[in-house]
Image (cartoon, grey):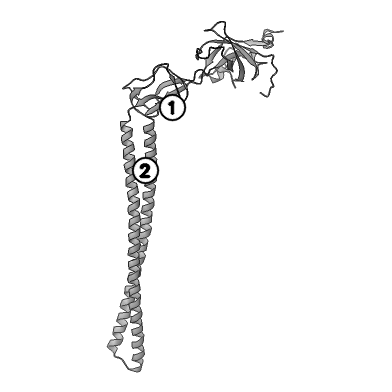
Amino acid sequence: MGWGEWVAGRIDQRTDDAYLKADTSPISSQISGQVKAVLVGDFEPVKAGDELVQIDDSDYAAQLARAKAAIGSAEAKIQNADSQIVLQQKIIAQSEAVVGEVVADRDRARAEYDRQQAASSEGWTTAQKRENAVADLRRFEAQLIEKQADVDAQRHKIDVLQTQKQQAEAELASRKADLEIARINLARTRIVSPINGFASASRVRIGQFVSAGTRVIDVVPLPYLYVLANYKETQLSRIRPGQTATLTIDAFPGHMLTGHVVDLSPASGSEFALLPPDNATGNFTKVAQRIAVRIEIDHADGLGNLLRPGMSVVPTIHTDEKVSLAN
């Protein structure tokens, strides 16, 4: 039996390449500005929503005020457009009334023209009266065409005013979006903790200018820790999620913690390296690869408030437990 086969067949798989880990939240500034206050001391406990750092908000408060004023201006434009539309509708009504008057005058002129034509055929009128009737009819017909054109022009102005109102409404929507952005940026001057835990040492100081993306502090979600154990590939043949593990912490000899396997990494550590090895060139020396195994801590044996990420751990996974391969 080879050494690798003997190692793989062991019931208890142990490694000293393991460490306590936590899903630490790195807190960064989302805006640029000068640090006004650091409200949490190094290593102090914090709760979700607690303010950690304040950035000077004077510029962002001014931007918010300007955005509010811009909304007032856009709303005034819409009201002005509505008023102009109402006024234009009244102008159209007046123009239509004028058209009605001209139509009445034309109808009277046409009736007079018809009478003069009939009287002329019987010799009861003069040429001058007949010519006046013709002139009056043509004059009123010309006026009717002019007034109807004026009504059409006034109606077209309604379409123009409606378009101007739509533009004002679009501007209002844009100004509202600017206002929301201004409110968001103002709120971002208060950097808060997203989780419960403990603050790291602050990375910024009062008066320091920070840019968007500057890391200001970290929050460690103590006591919620887990173990990341880097097992050799030759040790993994019987390790399955769900199996129990016993853990010893170098900092606390004599204390035995218990946990269970959650999952195995989808690839070896070398696959995630910035410069992964290329074994297709040059000489080759076979090196056993390591695969990360995540182990959740079930019982901390009274050490929950003392454990810290980065501490060295020696986990032992008990592979004699029957766990389905589907896990």
Which residue is label 1 attached to?
49
Q: Looking at numbered disc 1 in the image, what kind of residue is underneath it? A: Gly
Q: Position of residue 120 (x, y in %)?
A: 33, 91
- The residue tagged with tag 2: helix, strand or loop? helix
Query: Which of 322 and 256 lies nearest the eye of the viewer?
Result: 256
User: From the viewer's perspective, is 22 left or right of 239?
Assistant: left
Residue pushed farthest bottom?
123
Image quarter of residue 128: bottom left
Label annotation for residue 268: none
Position of the N terminus, as image quadrant, is: top right
Q: Position of residue 277 (x, y in %)?
A: 55, 17
User: From the viewer's perspective, is 90 left or right of 282?
Assistant: left
What residue appears at the point 36 percent right and 65 percent down from the top-left corner?
Answer: 152
Which residue is label 2 attached to?
175
Q: Looking at numbered disc 2 in the image, what kind of residue is underneath it? A: Arg
- The residue tagged with tag 1: helix, strand or loop? loop
User: From the viewer's perspective, is 193 left or right of 123?
Assistant: right
Q: Residue 172, relative to residue 292: is it above or below? A: below
Q: Residue 61, relative to residue 261: is it above or below? A: below
What residue appears at the point 34 percent right and 20 percent down from the top-left corner?
Answer: 205
What residue appears at the point 39 percent right and 41 percent down from the top-left corner?
Answer: 177
